[in-house]
Amino acid sequence: MRIGVVFPQTEIGGDAGAVRAYAEKVEGLGYSHLIAYDHVVGADTAVHRGWQGPYDMHSTFHEPLVLFGYLAALTSLELVTGIIILPQRQTVLVAKQAAEVDLLCGGRFRLGVGLGWNTVEYEALGKDFSDRGKRVEDQVELLRRLWTEPSVTFEAPDEKVTGAGLAPLPVQRPIPIWFGAASPPAYRRAGRLGDGWFPLIPPGPKLDEARALVDAAAVEAGRDPSTLGLEGRVSWGEGGATLVADHAERWRQIGATHLSVNTMGAGLASVDAHLDALAASAEVLGVTPR
């Protein structure tokens, strides 16, 4: 089981030096990968009365693909979007940006994708929120073709490419696509189309049910479900490293291929505090320092 970290988007702030120090320390602790969440704009709660989203316009979010271009020159970590909200972005531009990140980091890139929940963000980016589940499947097909074929002709209700291609192509052909999944349609989509998935529920009966849907969809699509990756997540909290170790063992027992340690939202007051929590977690998880 490969063990990485969740980049503390909402708490790390806008200091590039802090971003660099965080990533370099994470690599030094021995973690294998870094996951970054995606939000392009946040809602102004004075305008959107009764806003219920977990993030607003004051929540800090570094743009993941630009961030990864920076980190590719600084670390040898695998870089993972967890997730990019794909249907609110132009598919061909995502393909180009992802290919560039993959080149810059030497093929250490995973593109996690999902549908998102923020209608304000969809509107600001000029994309339809209502049919995002349908559109993402066409987007995934087009991404993979753009990463593997020098010239692509492709047409779908919201996509049209005529005899065009990316240059240079990425190192990984295609780049692995993982799905964030929190509902039966998303589980089935991950099984049909994904190289792996991020369940948003902990080990237990509900995850067993979700995994059964993923596996069944994979079989129906003629795929071997045992080849799909699964990334769990453990969060730093009041139980500290002991709780992290306990939850990680639960993920290990169900056969998770990857695990990420999340310190965001734990009430840690500084970048150093996040790194101290990650150091303590690394020790109990058996992560070997570099």
Image (cartoon, rainbow, N blue to C red):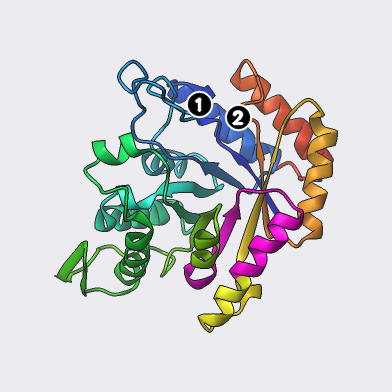
Q: Secondary structure at mark 2?
A: loop
Amino acid type, label 1: Thr
Q: Secondary structure at mark 1?
A: helix
Amino acid type, label 2: Met
Callout 2–callout 1 Cβ contact below 8 Å: yes
Q: Position of residue 80 (x, y in %)?
A: 51, 49
Residue 201 visible here: yes
Q: Position of residue 284 (x, y in %)?
A: 83, 39
Please state which of residues 21 and 224 is positioned toward the viewer in this rendering: 224
What residue is shown with label 2? 264
Please state which of residues 49 and 235 is positioned toward the viewer in this rendering: 49
Give the label on residue 137, or none: none
Q: Is residue 213 magenta?
A: yes
Q: Quadrant of residue 125?
A: top left
* In the image, farthest residue toward the left: 162
**Dot 1, crowdedness within 10 Å: few (<14), some or many (≥20)?**
some
Q: Position of residue 223 (x, y in %)?
A: 55, 80
Q: Is residue 246 left or right of residue 234?
A: right
Q: Position of residue 6 (x, y in %)?
A: 59, 39
Q: Is residue 236 magenta?
A: no
Residue found at x 42% / y 45%: 116
**CA–CA distance between discs 2 and 1?**
7 Å
Q: Is residue 238 left or right of residue 148?
A: right
Q: Which residues are magenta?
A: 191-214
What residue is shown with label 1? 10
* In the image, farthest residue toward the bottom: 222
* In the image, farthest residue toward the front: 50
Q: Is residue 234 above or below residue 152?
A: above
Rendered-image quadrant of the C terminus: top right
